Structures are given as C-alpha cells and as structure tokens.
Image (cartoon, rainbow, N blue to C red):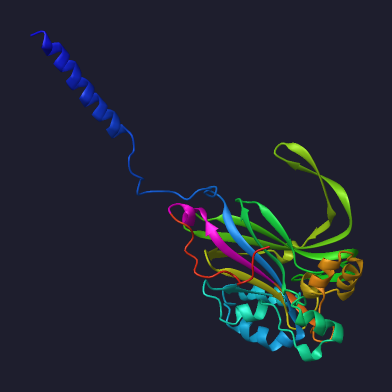
C-alpha cells in the first residue's frame, strides 16, 4: 500500500512528459509562408526604360502591332496620339522579339577604329546597354512612384493638346517623367494610374506635407499633365507599354526623346580610366538613337504572395536588374 502513491506519481510524470512532447511541434507545418511577405496593400513592379536606335524602327512597329491597344478607349488613344504618345498592354507571355528589341546591340568589328578593335580583342569593349533604367520596386496603395523617361534637354518648349484648348510652356533642364500610382483590387489585379509630368528648372528645396508634418525635399518644378492622365488594370505578369508616336513629335519628343549633347558631356567628364573603358561606345558602329519606351510590369501582388511566390513565367527582359 505504501508503494501505491509512488507508482501513481511516476505514472503521472510519464503521462505529463508525453503530453509536453505532443505540445512541441516536431514536424514543419505543411502551410508555410515566404519570408519577407509584402504588405497587404503592396504591389511589386518591374520598371524598364529602353533606348532604341534608328535601325530598330521597323522592328519596333512589328513588335507594337503584337500588343493589345484595344484595351484603352478610342477617345483616350486619339488624345494621346494628338500629343505624340501611344499606349498598349503586353500579355504575361511577351512577344519573342522583346529581348532582341531591348537587348544589347551587337558590335560590328569591321566598323571599329584601330583603338576600338584593340579593346574589342581584349574583351574590354562592350556595347552600351539599351536598358537606361531597369529596377524592381514595391509600391503601396495610393503611393506614386516617379520614373524619368527622357534625357535632360537644356531648354525646350511644349504644347499640350486638350479637347478644346492648348497649353503652352517652356523651361530649362527639361525632363519627361511618368508618375505611377498603384491600387490593388483584392482579386489579384492592380489598377495603375499614370500621369505624364514635365520636370524643369534647377533643383530647389520644396515644402510638402506628409504624415501630419511638414517635409522639406529637393526637386525641380513639376508640371503635372492632368489632361493626359489615364488608368488601366493589369494582372501579375502583364505590362503597360508607353512609347512616342512614330514621328516622335509633340509631347512624345519630351517624354521619350534624346539629347546627344548630355551623353557626350558625361563621357568627357568621366575621369576614372576603368569606368571610361567600360563605357566607351563604338563611334562608327553605334546607330543613332530613335526614341525610348517605358515598360511597367506587375510582378507580384499581396494575393500572389499569400501562399506562394508569384506565378510569373518570364521576366520583362533577360538583362540583370540594376
């Protein structure tokens, strides 16, 4: 009888120990979430600004005809066309010619100078990348992200055509900028609001309001073009493509035009010998620039990130993200 309490105590400890083991997870849960999940209202975007050359004009027209232009109302397309801009949607499976269109141009050794041939033989001469900008960002709901789409023009003027009127402006150090605002729709799609902007003038401090406080930031004077503001809804993998009209006129020349003088100045100011070799462009074989294009691709939404990574088969290009 005296051993009974001791026996009961041992049984209780064994049972209690077993219960404690059952409470500790011994196997990894089948339902796992990726690390660093996006915020509920965040959207992953891939942004690319590509510089095309004159030899690609027909190639680009063929590429453009494979995109969906009917996604946008006819009235909007007419208004943008009048201002020298055009828009289209590229599906989650881009045309096979995309990489060829925005990939690095080939170097023709026969058209090089003797100095360039020597660099090419040593593997030091590389063609300039057509991807002026290539980045991935995470954008919150209602947050505007600005991306520069053009070279800086020393001084120029512009005309913005509206339905019944025109707006004229002029400025120095003029750049074309696209403002992209995202609104996740909760079903895996994203509403993009696009607003063309003209930035000009010297960079100066500006006072704004954010998070219930005053903010001081530096920037140029901004001309938002509300008359050409538009929106579209895309799903993961789809892209919005914006380009100038074929004549690269009107606002299209400011938003996607080129300023060769600015590139030459940057090259003359380069003092690092190694960087200079890396950035040399073949003088004779380098085609003249045509215009730039902007590609905005929805990479991932919070719904894509809920249980797994985004099921996107192809990247915007095969070039590395800068």
- Horizontal arrangement in the rendering, residue 33 relative to residue 80 (left or right): left
233, 1: nearer the viewer: 1
Q: Quadrant of residue 233?
A: bottom right
- Of residues 267 and 184, the one drawn nearer to the viewer in this rendering: 267
Label count reads 0
Q: Is residue 27 visible?
A: yes
Tell me what residue is drawn at x 88 percent, y 70 percent. Answer: 267
Seen in the picture, residue 6 relative to 236 is either above or below; the reply is: above
108 w.r.t. 146: above or below: below
Which residue is at a point 71% across and 85% down the rendered structure image?
56
- Tell me if I can see residue 167 in this picture: no
x then y, percent, for residue 289:
79, 80
Q: Is residue 2 above or below residue 154?
A: above
Quadrant occupied by the N terminus: top left
Residue in front for this viewpoint, 234 or 298: 298
Q: Residue at x 15, y 11 (%)?
A: 5
- Residue 299 image point, x, y percent: 55, 62
Quarter of the rendering occupied by the C terminus:
bottom right
**Residue 188 drawn at (x, y percent):** 48, 59
Residue 11 on the magenta segment: no
Q: Residue at x 57, y 63 (%)?
A: 298
x, y percent for residue 169: 88, 66
Q: Nearer the viewer, residue 268 or 123?
A: 123
Residue located farthest toward the bottom when viewing the structure as drawn: 110
Choose top left, top right, bottom left or bottom right for residue 215. top right
From which residue to which does the magenta span run?
294-307
Q: Given the current orientation, which residue lies at the most extreme top position?
A: 2
């Amino acid at each position: 009888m005296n051993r009974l309490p001791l026996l009961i105590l041992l049984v209780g400890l064994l049972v209690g120990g077993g219960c404690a083991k059952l409470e500790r997870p011994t196997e990894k849960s089948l339902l796992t979430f990726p690390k660093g999940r996006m915020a509920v209202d965040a959207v992953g975007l891939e942004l690319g600004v590509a510089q095309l050359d004159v030899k690609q004009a027909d190639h680009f027209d063929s590429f453009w005809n494979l995109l969906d232009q009917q996604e946008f109302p006819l009235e909007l397309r007419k208004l943008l066309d009048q201002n020298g801009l055009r828009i289209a949607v590229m599906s989650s499976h881009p045309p096979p010619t995309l990489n060829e269109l925005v990939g690095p141009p080939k170097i023709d050794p026969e058209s090089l100078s003797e100095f360039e041939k020597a660099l090419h033989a040593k593997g030091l001469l590389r063609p300039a990348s057509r991807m002026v900008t290539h980045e991935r960002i995470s954008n919150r709901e209602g947050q505007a992200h600005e991306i520069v789409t053009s070279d800086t023009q020393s001084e120029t003027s512009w005309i913005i055509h509206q339905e019944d009127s025109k707006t004229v402006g002029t400025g120095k150090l003029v750049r074309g900028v696209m403002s992209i605002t995202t609104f996740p729709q909760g079903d895996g799609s994203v509403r993009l609001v696009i607003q063309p902007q003209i930035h000009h003038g010297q960079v100066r401090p500006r006072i704004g309001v954010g998070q219930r406080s005053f903010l001081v930031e530096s920037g140029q004077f901004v001309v938002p073009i509300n008359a050409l503001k538009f929106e579209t809804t895309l799903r993961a993998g789809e892209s919005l493509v914006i380009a100038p009209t074929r004549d690269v006129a009107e606002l299209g020349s400011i938003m996607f035009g080129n300023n060769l003088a600015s590139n030459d100045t940057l090259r003359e100011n380069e003092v690092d010998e190694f960087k200079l070799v890396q950035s040399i462009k073949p003088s004779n074989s380098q085609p003249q620039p045509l215009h730039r294009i902007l590609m905005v691709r929805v990479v991932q939404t919070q719904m894509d990130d809920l249980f797994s990574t985004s099921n996107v088969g192809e990247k915007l290009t095969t070039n590395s993200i800068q």
